[in-house]
Image (tube, coloured by chain):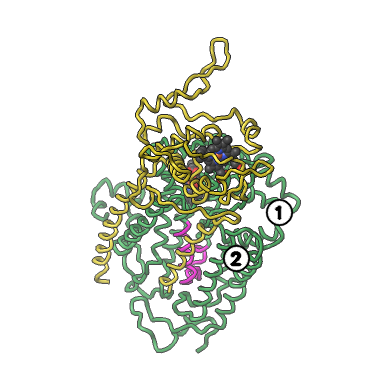
C-alpha cells in the first residue's frame, strides 16, 4: 500500500513548485530551441559573443551587469587582449589624486561592468520613473528567464514602438502589459554569424543567450559533471542492489 | 570490529570509553525486525541529508557575508568565483528540499504503519521536535541570501507574532532587533541557522536512543515474539540502506545538475528591496500546506493558532488514534482515510502556492477543516468502529491465524 502511494506523493511534491510560479496577467514566454538545453547542452560561443556586442552596443546605456568582470569574457572566447581593449572603453572610479580629489581611470580586466548611472535617482529620472534593473541575473530572476527575455524583446506589437501617453510601451510578456523601456533592438544593431544584418528575432535570441550565460556562467561545468556523477551513481547503485540481493538471499 | 577488540590497547581504551563496543552494539548487532520494507529507508536518508547540509553549510559559511549590503553579492561570488562554489551552494539549497522530501516520507511511513503508537510515543515526539527545528533552520537559511523572497518571507512570517494580544508588537520588534527586518535580523538568523542543525544532531541522537530502546516498528505493526523475528542490522540493513542512498543520490543529482533552480523561486535572484513588495509572496514548497492553513482563517491570530495546532495535534496522535492495531495493512477503513488525508495535504499545498483569492479561499478553508477533522474526529471514531483484519502470529511466521488474535484486535473488537 505504502509503495503504491509513494509515486503519487513524490509527484505531488514536485508538481507544486512549478505551479507556484504560474503567473497571472502575462503571456507565457515562447520556448526557443537553446543550445544549452538538454543533458549535453553547451553554450554557443559565437552566439554569446554576438549577444555581448548587442549588450555593449545598446543595453549598457541603461543597464548594469555588475556580476561580470571583463576577465570573465575570456570564458566566452574573447582573447585577453580583446577583453582588455573592451574594458578600456569604460571609465571607472580610480584612487584619489594627491589633493584627495576623486579620479577616474580606464577599466581593467579585473573590473566589473560599471553601472551606467551614478545612482538610482539618476536612473529613475532619465527613464520615465522606472529603474532599469541590473541584467546579470535577469535570466534566473524571472520564471522561464531565457525564453522570457527573448519573448519580451521580440514581441511584435512592442517593436512597433508606439508609446502610450505616459510613455509606456505595450508588451504582452511584461507583467501588467506596459513596460517603461522603449524597444531597444533595431535592424542594424547586431549581425548574424555570416555577417548579414540580424532580425529582431535573431538579436533577441543572441542577447537572451548572453544574459543566460551571465546568470549561469558555470552551466557547462555543471552539466558535464552531472553526467559523470550520475553514470557513476548508476553503476554504484547497481552493484549495491546486487550485493543487497546476495546478502538477503537467505533471509 | 570484534577482532579490533582483541588488540590490547584498543581493549584498554574501550574499557575506559566504550566507543567501539557502542558502535558494535548500535550500528552492527542492533536487532532489527526481519521484515522492514523500503519505507524504512527514509530515516537513514534523513540522517544523510542532515550531514550533507552541515558539511556544505560550513563551507558556505566560509565565504558568506551576513550583512544586508553584502549578503546577496557574497552568495553570487560563491556561485561564480569560489572553486566549485556553485556546486556547494546548489547542494545546500537543493539539499534542504530533499531533506524535507525524505523527512516527510519518513513521517508518512510512521502515519501509515502506526509507528507513533505505544511504546514509541516519545520517539514520535522527538521526531516532531526535529521537524519543527528543521522548519526553523530552513526558514532562517532562506533569509540568508537576502533576495526578495528572503526579505519578504522573513517580514511576513515574523509579523505573525504581532498577532499575539498586547505584547505582539514588542515581541516582533525584539525578534527583528529593530523596527523592521534589517541587518540585526539577518545577523541573528545567521547565528541561529548555524546553531540549529547541531541542535538537530543532538535530537537525532535522542531519537535513535528511544528507537533502540523500544526497537523498530515493522510493516506488520505487531510486537516481536523472540529472537527469530530479528536479524542483525549489519550486514542486512547496512546494505539495504546503502542501496537506498544510491537511489536517493541519483534523484538528488538529477535535480542538482539539471534543474538546480526548479524548487527555488526566481524572485530570490532579485536583491532584497524593502520598498518593493513582490506580487506574490510564497514560501518554499515544504511550507505550503502550513501556509494554506495559516491563510484559511480570516483572523490573523486564529490563523497563527491553526497553523501551530496543525503540528501541535500530531503530538497527541498516539491517543487520538484509538485503534490498537498499528499497521494500516490490517485496517481496511483507516487505509482509505489515510489516502484521503494525503490528498487533503496535497490540496493544502497547492492552495498555499496560489494567491489567497477567489475559489482558493473556500477550497483552502475546506481542506483545512478536513485536516483537523481527520485527526480530531475521524481517527478516534475509526479506531472505535473499524473491524481490523486478523493479525499474523509473529514476524517470523506471517501465517494468518484463523481469526483475530486475542488481545491484539482493536480496543472494542470483541469478535
Ligand atoms: C538542518 C540542516 C539545514 C537546512 C535544512 C538548511 C537550509 C538552508 C536553506 C533553505 C538555505 C537557503 C538556500 C539558498 O537559497 O541558497 C540555506 C542557506 C545557508 N545555510 Fe543552511 N541549512 C542547514 C544547515 C546549515 C548549516 C549546518 C550551516 C553552517 C554551519 C548552514 C549554512 C548556510 C549558509 C551560510 C547559507 C547561506 C548561503 C546560501 O544562501 O547559499 N546551513 N540553508
Q: Is A137 in front, or is B94?
A: A137
Element type at marker 2? helix
Most common SS among magenta residues = helix
Q: Is A222 in front, or is A138?
A: A138
Query: In x, y percent, where is residue B378?
Result: 59, 76
Q: Chain of mark 1?
A: B
Asked if residue B247 lies left or right of residue A199, the reply is left
Mark 2 or mark 1, earlier in chain: 1
In the figure, B150 relative to B45: above or below?
above
**Palette colour of chain A:** yellow
Asked if residue A98 lies left or right of residue A71, the reply is right
- Chain displayed in green: B
Q: Residues within 10 Å of mark 2 (few under 14, many from 20)?
A: few
Residue at the spot of label 1: B163
Q: Residues within 10 Å of mark 1 (few under 14, many from 20)?
A: some
Question: Does the magenta segment cover residue B105?
Answer: yes
Element type at marker 1? helix
Residue at the spot of label 2: B313
Q: To which quarter of the image does residue B222 belong?
A: bottom left
Q: Chain of mark 2?
A: B
Residue B145 visible within the image = no
Query: In x, y percent, where is residue B360?
Result: 63, 64
In the figure, A148 relative to B208: above or below?
above
Q: Which residues are magenta?
A: B100-124
Amino acid at each position: 500500500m505504502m509503495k503504491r502511494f509513494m509515486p503519487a506523493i513524490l509527484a505531488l511534491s514536485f508538481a507544486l513548485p512549478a505551479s507556484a510560479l504560474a503567473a497571472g496577467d502575462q503571456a507565457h514566454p515562447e520556448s526557443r530551441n537553446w543550445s544549452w538545453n538538454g543533458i549535453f547542452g553547451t553554450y554557443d560561443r559565437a552566439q554569446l559573443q554576438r549577444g555581448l556586442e548587442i549588450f555593449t552596443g545598446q543595453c549598457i546605456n541603461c543597464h548594469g551587469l555588475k556580476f561580470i568582470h571583463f576577465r570573465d569574457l575570456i570564458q566566452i572566447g574573447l582573447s585577453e587582449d580583446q577583453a582588455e581593449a573592451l574594458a578600456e572603453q569604460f571609465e571607472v572610479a580610480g584612487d584619489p589624486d594627491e589633493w584627495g580629489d576623486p579620479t577616474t581611470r580606464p577599466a581593467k580586466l579585473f573590473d566589473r561592468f560599471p553601472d551606467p548611472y551614478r545612482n538610482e535617482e539618476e536612473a529613475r529620472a532619465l527613464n520615465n520613473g522606472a529603474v532599469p534593473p541590473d541584467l546579470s541575473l535577469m535570466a534566473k530572476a524571472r520564471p522561464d528567464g531565457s525564453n522570457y527575455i527573448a519573448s519580451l524583446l521580440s514581441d511584435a506589437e512592442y517593436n512597433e514602438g508606439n508609446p502610450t501617453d505616459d510613455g509606456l510601451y505595450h508588451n504582452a510578456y511584461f507583467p501588467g502589459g506596459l513596460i517603461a523601456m522603449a524597444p531597444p533592438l533595431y535592424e542594424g544593431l547586431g549581425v548574424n554569424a555570416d555577417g548579414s544584418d540580424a532580425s529582431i528575432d535573431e538579436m533577441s535570441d543572441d542577447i537572451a543567450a548572453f544574459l543566460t550565460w551571465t546568470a549561469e556562467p558555470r552551466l557547462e561545468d555543471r552539466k558535464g559533471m552531472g553526467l559523470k556523477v550520475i553514470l557513476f551513481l548508476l553503476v554504484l547503485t547497481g552493484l549495491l542492489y546486487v550485493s543487497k540481493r546476495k546478502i538477503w538471499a537467505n533471509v | 570490529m570484534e577482532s579490533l577488540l582483541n588488540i590490547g590497547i584498543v581493549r584498554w581504551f574501550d574499557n575506559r570509553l566504550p566507543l567501539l563496543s557502542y558502535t558494535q552494539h548500535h550500528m552492527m548487532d542492533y536487532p532489527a525486525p526481519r521484515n522492514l520494507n523500503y519505507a524504512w529507508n527514509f530515516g537513514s536518508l534523513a540522517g544523510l541529508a542532515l550531514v550533507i547540509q552541515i558539511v556544505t553549510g560550513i563551507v558556505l559559511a566560509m565565504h558568506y557575508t551576513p550583512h544586508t549590503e553584502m549578503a546577496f553579492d557574497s552568495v553570487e561570488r560563491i556561485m561564480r568565483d569560489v572553486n566549485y562554489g556553485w556546486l556547494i551552494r546548489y547542494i545546500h539549497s537543493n539539499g534542504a528540499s530533499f531533506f524535507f522530501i525524505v523527512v516527510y516520507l519518513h513521517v508518512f511511513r510512521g502515519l501509515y504503519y502506526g509507528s507513533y503508537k505505544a511504546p514509541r510515543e516519545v520517539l514520535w515526539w522527538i521526531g516532531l521536535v526535529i521537524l519543527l527545528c528543521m522548519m526553523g533552520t530552513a526558514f532562517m537559511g532562506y533569509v540568508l541570501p537576502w533576495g526578495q523572497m528572503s526579505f519578504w518571507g522573513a517580514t511576513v512570517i515574523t509579523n505573525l507574532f504581532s498577532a499575539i494580544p498586547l505584547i505582539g508588537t514588542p515581541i516582533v520588534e525584539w525578534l527583528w532587533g529593530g523596527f523592521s527586518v534589517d541587518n540585526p535580523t539577518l545577523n541573528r538568523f545567521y547565528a541561529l541557522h548555524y546553531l540549529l542543525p547541531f541542535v538537530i544532531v543532538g535530537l537525532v541522537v535522542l531519537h535513535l536512543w528511544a528507537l533502540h530502546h523500544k526497537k523498530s516498528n515493522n510493516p506488520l505493526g505487531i510486537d516481536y515474539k523472540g529472537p527469530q523475528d530479528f536479524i542483525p542490522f549489519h550486514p542486512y540493513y547496512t546494505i539495504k540502506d546503502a542501496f537506498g542512498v544510491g537511489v536517493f543520490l541519483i534523484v538528488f543529482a538529477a535535480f542538482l545538475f539539471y534543474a538546480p533552480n526548479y524548487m527555488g523561486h526566481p524572485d530570490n535572484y532579485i536583491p532584497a528591496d524593502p520598498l518593493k513588495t513582490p506580487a506574490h509572496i510564497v514560501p518554499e514548497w515544504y511550507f505550503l500546506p502550513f501556509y494554506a492553513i495559516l491563510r484559511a482563517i480570516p483572523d490573523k491570530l486564529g490563523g497563527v493558532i491553526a497553523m501551530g495546532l496543525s503540528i501541535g495535534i500530531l503530538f497527541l496522535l498516539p491517543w487520538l488514534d484509538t485503534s490498537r492495531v498499528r499497521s494500516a495493512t490490517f485496517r481496511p477503513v483507516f487505509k482509505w482515510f489515510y489516502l484521503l488525508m494525503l490528498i487533503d495535504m496535497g490540496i493544502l499545498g497547492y492552495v498555499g502556492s496560489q494567491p489567497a483569492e477567489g475559489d482558493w479561499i473556500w477550497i483552502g478553508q475546506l481542506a483545512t477543516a478536513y485536516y483537523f477533522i481527520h485527526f480530531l474526529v475521524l481517527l478516534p471514531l475509526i479506531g472505535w468502529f473499524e473491524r481490523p483484519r486478523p493479525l499474523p502470529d509473529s514476524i517470523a511466521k506471517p501465517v494468518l491465524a484463523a481469526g483475530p488474535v486475542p488481545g491484539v484486535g482493536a480496543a472494542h473488537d470483541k469478535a
